[in-house]
Image (cartoon, helix red, strand yellow):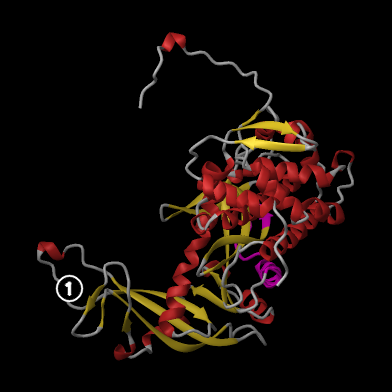
């Protein structure tokens, strides 16, 4: 591709008041309006400080900015250009929005978290956000150490995180998140919680898990619900809370002596090969030839805690540890295995339960979307302001997922960056006609024209008839 004009004859000027650069915000905020975002904020969020007024206007403004790509308070200025004031009301300056966030207390953050849960239930009822949730859904709980800079960040401290498989100490804040997904749906956020940077992953996880299960049920997950977590959440409090809330648990187990003894008790003929990376299907044996095998054994955990012992299944996956010096003639005398154990009361078969637990890594997709979007930074020095920013990022993520589900099946599972590129960041010219009518003229030949128009019709057209 090359320019068709001489370089000296190309000119530019920023002077058209009828253009907008992110016309995709029109159907997105129409959906938010129909789901009652402003009304939910007005009914539940009440910051008491002077700059906390008009929360029902400022919260949607912050959410719209995040959907449009803002990852800091200053970036909210991207909402103030061209014909945006003619399309939307209530647009506020970044300084006003920053003062609003700093007016939050921890109690206001909890109020905003309630709005996030209620908003998720509204979106799930109005859009095909979680197809198949009435049959099977997964609740994945994990934490992320978000690096921050500067000496004035409240709550910042050194905490452990993994980067390329290595455990490192990173100075930051710890974000705890619970996502809901189904075999047919990409993850949405059921609950969030920002904590100090030195917080242990499992701190407050039991109560958090109970809240997340309740949010999942309210969002339509009426079928089997399995809560998955890594070894940091392996505790009597967490598993007991999940079971009490009416869900099943599937938690990675630390390799302590008791677990190792349970693994040693498994007979050799009880191991089953599984479909694993580099596995080969053998037609004659009618099974997978793989370097990974699974087995299970009944197991009672937390026996040292009076009245908190839980009996369930211990599912073990073992992977053969290949001899790196075999090519040099140093063959192995006997196979060496690496073991990975999962404690679960899942109602599924051994192979299903083990494969489903490996899919817990889907929560990393959320963290990738967050760090590539609104959580690229935690923009304030105030801890409650940053906690509110995390909750707003969750609302923005769920709203973006809902719009994708209305656009097409492919968009329903696309990455957040893809949805911004294809549906949100579309330039348009506005034109008024008739009495109060407005037409948004978009680029001819846009590669997602069909999906964009499907989204607009679903978000602004007549409401669907009740079943």
| Disc 1 residue crowd, few under 14, some 14–19, many 20+, Cα 10 Å | few
Q: Which residues are magenta?
A: 193-219
In the picture, which quadrant includes the C terminus? bottom right
Determine if the magenta segment contains residue 201. Answer: yes
Identify which residue, 216 or 175, lies in the foreground: 216
Residue drawn at (59%, 42%) of the image: 424
Residue 252 in the image: state x and y as whole percent. 49, 73
Q: Residue at x 72, y 51 (%)?
A: 32
Q: Secondary structure at mark 1?
A: loop
Question: Is 407 situated left or right of 218 in this image?
Answer: left
Residue indicated by mark 1? 332
Q: Quadrant of residue 79?
A: top right
Farthest top residue? 8
Q: Position of residue 291 (x, y in %)?
A: 27, 73
In the displayed structure, does residue 38 sit left or right of residue 409?
A: right
Q: Residue furthest left?
A: 329
Residue 86 visible: yes
Check the image and report above or below for 50 versus 1.
below
In the rendered picture of this protein, how many numbered marks are placed on residues? 1
Q: Is residue 286 magenta?
A: no
Visible in this render: residue 88?
Answer: no
> In x, y percent, where is residue 428?
61, 33
Front residue of 188 and 139: 188
């Amino acid at each position: 591709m090359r320019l068709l004009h001489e370089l000296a004859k190309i000119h530019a000027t920023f002077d058209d008041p009828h253009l907008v650069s992110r016309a995709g915000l029109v159907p997105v905020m129409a959906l938010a309006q129909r789901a009652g975002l402003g009304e939910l904020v007005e009914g539940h969020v009440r910051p008491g400080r002077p700059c906390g007024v008009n929360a029902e206007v400022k919260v949607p403004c912050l959410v719209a900015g995040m959907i449009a790509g803002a990852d800091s308070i200053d970036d909210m200025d991207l909402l103030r250009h061209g014909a945006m004031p003619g399309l939307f009301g209530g647009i506020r300056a970044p300084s006003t929005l920053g003062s609003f966030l700093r007016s939050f207390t921890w109690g206001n953050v909890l109020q905003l978290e309630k709005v996030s849960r209620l908003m998720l239930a509204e979106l799930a009822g109005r859009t095909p956000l979680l197809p198949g949730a009435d049959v099977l859904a997964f609740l994945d709980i994990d934490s992320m150490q978000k690096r921050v800079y500067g000496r004035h960040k409240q709550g910042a401290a050194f905490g452990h995180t993994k980067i390329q498989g290595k455990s490192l100490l990173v100075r930051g804040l710890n974000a705890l998140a619970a996502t809901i997904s189904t075999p047919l749906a990409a993850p949405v956020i059921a609950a969030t919680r920002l904590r100090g940077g030195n917080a242990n992953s499992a701190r407050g996880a039991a109560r958090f898990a109970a809240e997340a299960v309740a949010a999942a049920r309210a969002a339509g997950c009426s079928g089997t619900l399995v809560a998955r977590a890594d070894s940091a959440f392996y505790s009597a409090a967490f598993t007991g809370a999940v079971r009490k809330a009416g869900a099943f648990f599937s938690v990675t187990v630390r390799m302590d002596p008791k677990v190792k003894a349970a693994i040693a008790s498994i007979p050799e003929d009880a191991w089953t090969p599984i479909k694993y990376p580099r596995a080969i299907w053998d037609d004659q044996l009618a099974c997978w030839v793989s370097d990974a095998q699974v087995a299970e054994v009944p197991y009672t955990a937390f026996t040292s805690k009076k009245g908190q012992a839980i009996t369930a299944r211990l599912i073990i996956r073992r992977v053969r540890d290949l001899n790196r010096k075999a090519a040099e003639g140093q063959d192995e005398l006997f196979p060496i295995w690496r073991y990975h154990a999962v404690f679960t009361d899942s109602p599924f078969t051994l192979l299903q339960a083990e494969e489903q637990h490996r899919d817990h890594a889907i929560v990393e997709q959320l963290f990738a979307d967050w760090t590539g979007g609104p959580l690229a930074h935690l923009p304030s020095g105030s801890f409650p302001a940053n906690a509110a920013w995390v909750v707003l990022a969750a609302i923005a993520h769920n709203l973006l997922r809902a719009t994708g589900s209305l656009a097409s099946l492919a968009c329903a599972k696309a990455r957040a960056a893809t949805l911004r590129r294809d549906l949100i960041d579309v330039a348009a010219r506005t034109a008024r006609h008739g009495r109060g009518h407005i037409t948004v003229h978009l680029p001819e030949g846009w590669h997602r024209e069909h999906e964009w128009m499907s989204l607009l019709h679903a978000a602004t057209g007549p409401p669907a008839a009740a079943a």
